[in-house]
Amino acid sequence: MIVILKPKTKKGDVDKLINKLESQGVQVHPVDGAEISILGLVGDTTKIDSSSIEACDIVERVMYVQEPFKKANRAFHPDNSIIDVCGRKIGGKEIALIAGPCSVETKEQITLIANEVKKSGAGFLRGGAFKPRTSPYSFQGLGADGLELLKIARKNTGLPIVTEIMSPHYIEKFVQDVDIIQVGARNMQNFDLLKELGTINKPILLKRGLSATIEELLMSAEYIMAGGNEDVILCERGIRTFETYTRNTLDLSAIPAIKKLSHLPVVVDPSHSAGKAWMVDSLSKAAVAVGADGLIIEVHNNPAKALCDGQQSITPASYDKLVSELRLIAEAVGREI
Ligand code: PEP
Ligand code: MN
């Protein structure tokens, strides 16, 4: 971090500022130029509140020379993080395949889909029980009953389950019942929820907010990691742009960008990105080609009758074909399915 001082500052005022900064655990290196003077801050600057420094009378501007996230930063953790979920690895050579319906609807539906996606090679089962819906009149999910049905499907297939949490109220139950806790796009900046999730010992799938920058996504991961839970998997699920043809715009450039900035695994959700079942195939292939560590895909046995997101759900047969084609792409980029 660099603090640029206003011209003609008094030495006594600069010394006071230096003392204030040093009391926050950083080393301060003053540099006096002919025109301007600056203070170079070395050490852990993550806890320094740049806006309070900028509010000082003698300060012109504060500049970051490093990203404001630390635990999620590749600079402090050069190797890729590999997250262990019930013995399955996310972030290693193998591409993680997470698949299942948008929402858990019935025992038959979730077990049938779980069996189908498992046969095709999926390693994890997704399914929403607590659903964040735009309209309060839309199907809100089966809630705790949905979790019970997911557990039955896990028992039948052995697939670890991934499902969304909406409120800190349910954390204890999710820790008991769920293998990966999903934080949806709408809750990416629910900081109370993120802080609570930082205190538990369970992998978190953190989805990018609807209009969140990559840095904001990584700062949300930082909230969880700062609390001690470093098992965070990031998810690019499309962002809101001026384009309305697709539900969201899949930001493929986010994958190499995140890989450069962070050591955390990144999975892609082509279903919520495009909002169109027929695009899932090409977007999934593109995601693997640019380095995604996994794919979370909505699969439904009867998309036309799905209670949620049928328009973007692919059938088990399409999923099967997609996975077999993805194997070739994975191999071409040095990965495995
Ligand atoms: C979901 O995965 O079920 C979901 C609601 O996704 P998002 O939070 O990305 O909209
Ligand atoms: Mn959905």
Image (cartoon, rainbow, N blue to C red):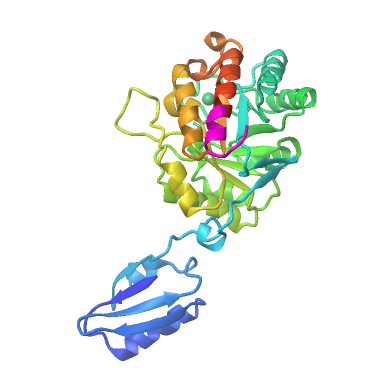
Residue 145 sits in quarter: top right
Residue occupying the far bottom of the picture: 12
Q: Is residue 131 visible?
A: no
Quarter of the image that includes the C terminus: top right
User: At 65% from the left edge and 41% from the top edge, which residue is drawn?
Assistant: 169
Q: Position of residue 80 (x, y in %)?
A: 58, 51
Residue 139 is at least partly visible in this image = yes
Number of numbered discs overlaid on the protein picture = 0
Q: Residue furthest left?
A: 35
Residues drawn in magenta: 328-337
The structure residue drawn at horizontal position 62% and vertical position 57%, both measured from the top left corner, is 227
Quarter of the picture containing the N terminus is: bottom left
For residue 90, above or below residue 107: below
> Residue 78 or 85: which is nearer the viewer?
78
Q: Position of residue 121 (x, y in %)?
A: 66, 25
> Foreground residue, 175 or 27?
27
Q: Position of residue 286 (x, y in %)?
A: 45, 31
**On the picture, is 7 further left or further right than 11?**
left
Residue at the image position 49 percent from the left and 22 percent from the top: 281
Furthest toward the right, the residue is: 155
Q: Nearer the viewer, residue 141 or 22?
A: 22
132 vs 208, nearest the viewer: 208
Task: Please say if 13 is above or below 183.
Answer: below
Q: Would you say residue 217 sits in the magenta stretch?
A: no
The answer to whether residue 330 is magenta is: yes
Position of residue 69 relative to residue 246, above or below, is below
